[in-house]
Image (tube, rainbow, N blue to C red):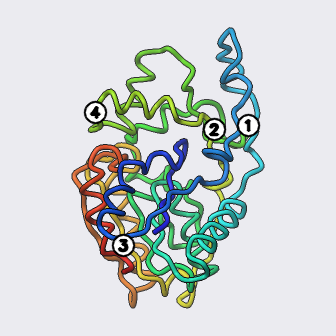
């Protein structure tokens, strides 16, 4: 089983889930997505002193050239290496969803089961970014936190250098509303400020023989304030309408956007049987 994190996070976010999966008899490996973790590149303002709010809003991101193609190429290489050429279950959280979708479309023989944990799952050949502007997304807690213009910066940027208590509280509510405060604070300190906007603007044309043939499960997080439940269910409805012969299996967790930190044991229990 290959576990892929969402934007601003890294493979570290699965550290509480992997032991449960291994204890349940599954091999599980968490990997970094392009532009994140060991592939992250921090903008200069992030460590420069004194703090410069103008630079936060204007400095072009060092990951501005990372595209959905790049992210999919990296994930495909990871899947091939980990599975040894055999199909594996791939679990995608949040903005890793479009990356998994591209890999499953290109190489359906290598994805035994595609699992979307409160993730973007466009099924109509439109970019994931389009779903941040639909009526169902109104009121999400992430959009007000994004700094600058993503089309100019080349990234979706969050300001983890600010000491503004209201902003930091907004981060907590958006990502970690039901996570232990100490764990949430530790996780926030590990987040990467820039996530490549190109991953959200890329598109994948889906076919019945590609992504449409791969078994898929969607884990709805009913307390999510980043990708709200109505948006999650829209993904499911559109996928099922596009590929009615291969409907989405749906399970729910009473969790926020980060069930890998708030309910790792429960999340692992849902994942264990998938793709066996």
**Identity of the residue furthest to the left in this view:** 254
Report which residue position mark 2 lands on. 194
Specify few, some or many for label 1: CA neighbours under 10 Å numbering under 14, 14-19, or 20 or more: many
Which labelled disc corresponds to residue 135?
none
Whole-percent x, y for residue 143 in the image = 49, 38
Give the alpha-carbon distance from disc 4 to disc 1, as whole Å.
Answer: 31 Å
> From the viewer's perspective, is residue 141 above or below residue 132?
above
Whole-percent x, y for residue 251 in the image = 26, 67
Q: Residue at x 67, y 20 (%)?
A: 47
Report which residue position mark 3 lands on. 217
- The tag earlier along the polypeptide, 2 or 3, is 2
- Residue 245 quadrant: bottom left
Give the alpha-carbon distance from disc 1 to disc 3, as whole Å.
Answer: 34 Å
Give the alpha-carbon distance from disc 4 to disc 2, as whole Å.
Answer: 25 Å
Report which residue position mark 1 lands on. 61
Asked if the residue at tag 2 contacts the one at tag 1, i.e. Cβ–Cβ closer than 8 Å, the answer is yes
Whole-percent x, y for residue 158 in the image = 56, 32
Asked if the residue at tag 3 contacts the one at tag 2, i.e. Cβ–Cβ closer than 8 Å, the answer is no
Asked if the residue at tag 3 contacts the one at tag 4, i.e. Cβ–Cβ closer than 8 Å, the answer is no
Label 2: element kind: strand
- The tag earlier along the polypeptide, 1 or 2, is 1
**Quarter of the figure that contains the N terminus:** bottom left
Q: Residue at x 31, y 60 (%)?
A: 268
- The tag earlier along the polypeptide, 1 or 3, is 1
Report which residue position mark 4 lands on. 180
Marks 4 and 2: which is nearer the front? Answer: 4
Task: From the viewer's side, name the closer residue of 224 and 19.
Answer: 19
Task: From the viewer's side, name the closer residue of 190 and 25.
Answer: 25
Whole-percent x, y for residue 76 in the image = 64, 70
- Residue 91 quadrant: bottom left
């Amino acid at each position: 089983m290959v576990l892929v994190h969402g934007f601003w996070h890294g493979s570290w976010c699965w550290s509480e889930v992997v032991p449960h999966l291994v204890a349940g008899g599954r091999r599980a490996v968490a990997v970094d997505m392009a532009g994140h973790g060991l592939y992250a590149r921090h903008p200069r303002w992030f460590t420069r002193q004194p703090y410069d709010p103008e630079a936060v809003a204007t400095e072009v991101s060092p990951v501005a050239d990372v595209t959905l193609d790049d992210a999919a190429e990296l994930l495909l290489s990871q899947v091939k290496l980990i599975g040894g050429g055999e199909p594996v279950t791939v679990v995608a959280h949040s903005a890793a969803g479009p990356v998994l979708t591209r890999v499953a479309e290109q190489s359906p023989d290598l994805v035994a089961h595609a699992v979307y944990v409160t993730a973007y799952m466009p099924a109509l050949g439109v970019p994931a970014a389009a779903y941040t502007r639909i009526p169902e997304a109104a009121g999400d807690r992430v959009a007000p936190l994004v700094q600058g213009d993503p089309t100019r910066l080349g990234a979706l940027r969050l300001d983890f250098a600010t000491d503004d208590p209201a902003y930091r509280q907004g981060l907590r509510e958006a990502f970690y509303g039901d996570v232990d405060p100490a764990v949430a604070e530790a996780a926030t300190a590990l987040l990467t400020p820039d996530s490549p906007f190109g991953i959200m603007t890329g598109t994948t044309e889906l076919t019945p023989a590609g992504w449409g043939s791969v078994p898929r499960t969607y884990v709805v997080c009913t307390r999510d304030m980043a990708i709200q439940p109505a948006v999650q269910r829209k993904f499911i409805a559109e996928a099922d309408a596009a590929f009615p012969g291969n409907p989405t299996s749906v399970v729910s967790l009473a969790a926020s956007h980060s069930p890998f930190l708030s309910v790792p044991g429960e999340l692992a229990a849902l994942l264990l049987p998938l793709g066996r």
